[in-house]
Image (cartoon, rainbow, N blue to C red):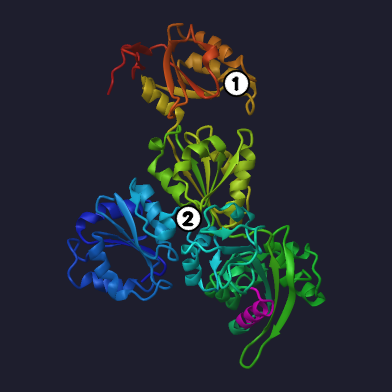
């Protein structure tokens, strides 16, 4: 049985279409079906659960809550080890995290499923109903690992509304922005917890209190060929313990590329579920280290492996916490190894990170696609222009941060979102309309391509309804023949090129959508575009002015090209100019699918 998968199953064959939707969306990874494809026999589902329960991450079950509860009851062990169980009704209207809402991620999975299906997540936990964070699980969304502590006592303390001290020794500074921390004392306020109470600590170190550990430690390892796995494990565990560092805070292993096929090193990375980054000798040799070795220089062409690899993996602002430590074989072991520890300024885990490019549509939440809604639900940081994030604000949960930018900071927003995704976070970079149409997708993808292949987080684009589409829908059917879009902003494109495109559109008799038509600093370009388009079509050509589409202030009006009210147009307006065959009747604009004499198929 495959481990750590999200399985889906239903109590009847009627559940299969819903499960297939979730499978296609990537929200479940396997679907369990009756062997005969008809209905489950009495013994078959219990046998499936017996085989699956100890190994899966979550189960998504379609059926009645009571029936699912009785079905899984024999396999329940503890909240620390049981998988999450999310129950759906056959219509996909409700997603209920029956088990594992916090630690196993049931609530987050239910929210993602509900967003994908256009349904509702029914959350009954005390934190969720109070609009607060569950302190024992929120760090998972940040790629952190939960460490030691009396978590049950902490949660009960929070539920009694007793103060919980927040100690932020190390971690992503953005976490300071999180709101609704169940009565946590913010950093800088009164330190320490209530008498006898538990503290919540974000740290790289072991210690008192309930601890979340950001993965920011890189372990550089050098070893002789054929070194035993037990030696490497002892060296790793002893070094961390000696310095009080938490194993959960380890981001990964690093070494020389000549060790990339070392069996014990590969098995260590697999057992500890850690990435292994390997560097060339010239890369390692360029790093200044406190303990260079002439012997290593002779053999590998670099004076350091462990210290240099740890510092390289930790990034430009990394610092060495532990110089190299040497461990030699004991008993039946073979070989020798060195280990050094470096601390990164930020956690780095692109293999776990995800960058979602989201087109939020024109503004109304009703016009947000299910695909985009699901991506927003799973993201822990939203990055975008403040106005666009304001429109999405009703969908944001307390454990989701937002980073607002201005209209002229597109490149910086892309860089910020990509850096957060490289740290292992799931990030939503939001554009209005469709992110691939005058949005952020292209710029973000260019920056993503500039990264080394191993440093790239996952990247996906989620389309949205563009202003062009909504303007056409409001006006009638003006895009039934060939059309083009042209931005009149010369901030990124020389005006000479824009004029060339306008002339070509006029000569080709295209329906033309004009984006960014007019602003306070650009008040003449629209009139010039009007002049150029009039050279190729009559003054009576219908024009749609669509302003604030999808928002409460929406206004759509019909005009003619010859009498276009240029002074009524601003940056929130889309101008849609018909071609020579477009016409208006009954307040609706239409562009015929063919020209006179053409035969429609």
- Name above or below for residue 102 compared with residue 526: below
- Which contiguous range is marked in magenta? 232-245
What residue is rendered at 67% in x and 57% in y? 188
Q: Position of residue 9 (x, y in %)?
A: 28, 61
For residue 187, side relative to residue 143 (left or right):
right
What residue is rendered at 64% in x and 37% in y? 409
Q: Which mark is residue 519?
A: 1
Structural distance between the alpha carbons of marks 2 and 1: 42 Å
- Name above or below for residue 508 compared with residue 279: above
Viewport quadrant of the C terminus? top left
Magenta: main secondary structure equals helix
- Name above or below for residue 156 compared with residue 383: below
Residue highlighted by disc 2 = 132
Is 139 or 237 nearer to us in this picture? 139
Is 524 or 220 nearer to us in this picture? 524
Q: Position of residue 377 (x, y in %)?
A: 44, 49
First in sequence: mark 2 vs mark 1: 2
Q: Secondary structure at mark 1?
A: loop
């Amino acid at each position: 049985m495959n481990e750590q998968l999200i399985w889906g199953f239903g109590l009847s064959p009627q559940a299969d279409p819903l499960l297939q939707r979730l499978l296609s969306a990537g929200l479940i990874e396997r679907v369990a079906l009756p062997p005969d494809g008809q209905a489950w026999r009495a013994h078959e589902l219990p046998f499936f659960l017996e085989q699956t329960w100890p190994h899966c991450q979550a189960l998504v079950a379609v059926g009645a809550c009571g029936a699912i509860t009785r079905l899984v009851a024999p396999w329940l062990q503890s909240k620390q080890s049981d998988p999450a169980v999310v129950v759906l009704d056959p219509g996909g209207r409700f997603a209920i995290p029956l088990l594992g809402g916090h630690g196993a991620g049931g609530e987050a999975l239910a929210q993602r499923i509900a967003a994908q299906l256009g349904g509702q997540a029914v959350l009954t936990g005390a934190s969720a109903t109070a609009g607060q964070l569950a302190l024992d699980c929120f760090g998972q969304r940040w790629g952190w690992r939960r460490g030691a502590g009396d978590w049950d006592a902490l949660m009960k303390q929070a539920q009694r509304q007793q103060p919980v001290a927040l100690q932020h020794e190390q971690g992503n500074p953005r976490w300071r922005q999180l709101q609704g921390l169940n009565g946590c004392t913010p950093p800088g306020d009164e330190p320490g917890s209530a008498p006898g109470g538990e503290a919540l600590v974000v740290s790289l170190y072991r210690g008192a209190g309930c601890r979340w550990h950001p993965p920011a430690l890189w372990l550089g390892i050098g070893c002789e060929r054929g070194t035993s796995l037990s030696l490497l494990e002892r060296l790793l565990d002893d070094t961390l313990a000696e310095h009080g560092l938490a194993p959960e805070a380890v981001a990964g292993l690093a070494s020389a590329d000549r060790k990339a096929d070392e069996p014990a090193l590969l098995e260590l990375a697999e057992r500890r579920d850690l990435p292994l980054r390997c560097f060339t000798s010239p890369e390692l040799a360029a790093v200044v280290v406190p303990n260079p070795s002439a012997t290593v220089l002779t053999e590998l062409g670099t004076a350091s492996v462990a210290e240099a690899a740890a510092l390289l993996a930790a990034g430009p602002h990394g610092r060495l916490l532990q110089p190299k430590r040497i461990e030699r074989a004991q008993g039946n072991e073979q070989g020798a190894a060195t280990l050094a520890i470096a601390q990164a300024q930020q956690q780095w885990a692109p293999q776990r990170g995800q960058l979602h490019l989201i087109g939020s549509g024109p503004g109304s939440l009703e016009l947000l696609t299910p695909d985009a809604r699901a991506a927003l639900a799973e993201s822990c940081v939203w990055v975008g222009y403040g106005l666009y994030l304001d429109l999405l604000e009703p969908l944001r949960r307390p454990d989701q941060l937002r980073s607002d930018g201005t209209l002229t900071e597109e490149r910086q927003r892309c860089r910020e979102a990509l850096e957060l995704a490289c740290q292992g976070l799931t990030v939503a970079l939001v554009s209005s309309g469709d992110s691939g149409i005058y949005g952020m997708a292209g710029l973000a993808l260019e920056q993503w391509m500039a990264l080394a292949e191993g440093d790239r987080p996952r990247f996906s684009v989620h389309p949205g309804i563009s202003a062009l589409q909504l303007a056409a829908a409001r006006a009638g059917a003006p895009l039934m023949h060939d059309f083009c879009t042209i931005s009149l902003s010369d901030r990124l494109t020389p005006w000479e090129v824009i004029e060339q495109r306008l002339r070509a559109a006029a000569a080709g008799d295209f329906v033309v959508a004009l984006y960014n038509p007019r602003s306070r600093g650009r008040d003449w370009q629209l009139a010039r575009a009007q002049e150029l388009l009039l050279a190729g079509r009559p003054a009576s050509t219908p024009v749609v002015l669509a302003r604030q589409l999808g928002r409460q202030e929406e206004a759509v009006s019909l005009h003619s090209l010859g009498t276009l009210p240029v002074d009524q147009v601003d940056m929130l307006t889309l101008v849609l100019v018909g071609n020579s065959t477009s016409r208006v009747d009954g307040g609706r604009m239409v562009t015929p699918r063919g020209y006179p004499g053409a035969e429609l198929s």
